[in-house]
Image (cartoon, grey):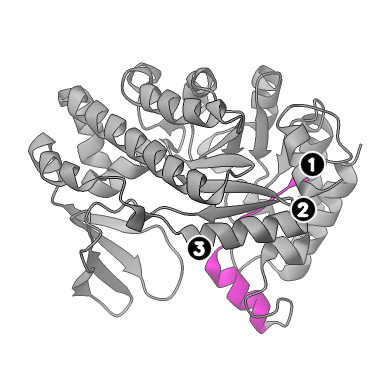
Amino acid sequence: MTGKERMQKILKHEPVDRIGVYEHFWDDTHKAWESGGYLKPNESYEDHFGLDMQEFWAFNLIADLDFKPQVVGETEDTITYLDGNGASLRRHKFHDTTPEHVDFQVKDREGWEKIKPLLTPDPRRIDFAGYRKAKEEAAKAGRFFVWSGLNVFECIHPVCGHENMLMGMVLDPEWVKDMADTYASLIVELQKILFQAEGYPDGIWYYEDMGFKERPFMSPQMYCQLIQPAHIATISYAKELGLPVIMHSCGFVEPLLPHMIEAGIDCLQVIEIKAGMDLLKLHRLYGDKICFMGGIDVRTLYTNDRAVIDKELEEKIPVVKNGFNYMLHSDHSIPNTVHYDTYCYFLKKALELGTY
């Protein structure tokens, strides 16, 4: 069974030979494993580990495509850029981190109205050649190929920041809804242009981090009012094409999940344990409705202790493989502190437990 065949069946809850396998890694990890002689330069994880899926990030959704990022601050360890969204973001120079929000030119409806006209479905936003190449690579390797990119929540906060966005949900909800609807329309129109030119993927993968530790960023009521309509719009287009939708969301999103299912997602990824998510609970409550990818505590891999890894996998894999609706993935990304041999052991052990 190829990775494509396996993923297609899992997303339909149909019998397969084993659980699916996919993973994300920090850039620093490839450098460390490459310097250790384990990976060849530019060798993909998909090829090296025989992963079942391949993504390609095809769109540039920055507001001003012609803006050249400007350095507005620098220290020994960090550098701060002003980008085409009017956002000042601080990044670490020496290792991968989520950028720190420093300042935003868009703080309210007035600021938004200045950049909204820039958000047009310009073909310059699309990496046609990269998509074509990745699609061909995946097809040749028999992997399930997904278009991947941001959905609306992840488009909005780089423009105005989480604080302004969340305060806007309370003080000016129609402004936030307008941003969500604008980005939903832009995403779908760009997908139409790309797919007409280069063909359809096997599925859609949306990134949408809507939670933090033990809380979602918004109430279920606010999600349903302001964000869910945009999710329905983007997901409905995928469903019109017969494409399953995987939605990634870091943080605690359990209260939102029933409404994400209503919006049409087929799979939830990444199920972050340290934020309070519980893979076994979610599988029990919603396993008949959606698939799951993730939920394996990456901190167990940090230990590089096989007994700790065994315990994590043995508690979860035999349970969540029931229903043919699970794909192996850590609950975040693999850092360079995880030894190459540790990850190989993790993968081998999980597949032993996850074979039917």
Q: Amino acid at mark 1?
A: Glu
Q: Is residue 131 left or right of residue 337?
A: left
Report the span colored magenta: 19-35
Mark before the other along the chain sequence, 1 or 3: 1
Locate residue 36: give its quadrant: bottom right
Q: Residues within 10 Å of mark 1 (few under 14, many from 20)?
A: some
The spot of residue 217 in percent (x, y) is 36, 32
The spot of residue 153 in percent (x, y) is 36, 37
Mark before the other along the chain sequence, 3 or 2: 3
SS at badge 1: helix
Locate residue 120: give its quadrant: top left
Q: Name the residue carrying label 2.
A: 142
Q: Amino acid at mark 2?
A: Gly
SS at badge 2: loop
Q: Which mark is in front, 3 or 2?
A: 3
* Residue 206 visible at all: yes
Mark before the other along the chain sequence, 2 or 1: 1
Kindly report the distance in space between the C-alpha atoms of the residues bearing marks 1 and 3: 25 Å
* Residue 272 visible at all: no
Q: Amino acid at mark 3?
A: Ala
SS at badge 3: helix
* Quarter of the N terminus within the rendering: top right
Q: Is residue 169 left or right of residue 192?
A: left
Q: Vertical placement of 16 versus 99: above or below?
A: above
Q: Name the residue carrying label 3.
A: 129
Pick whichever, 276 or 220, lies toward us: 220
Q: Which mark is residue 5?
A: 1
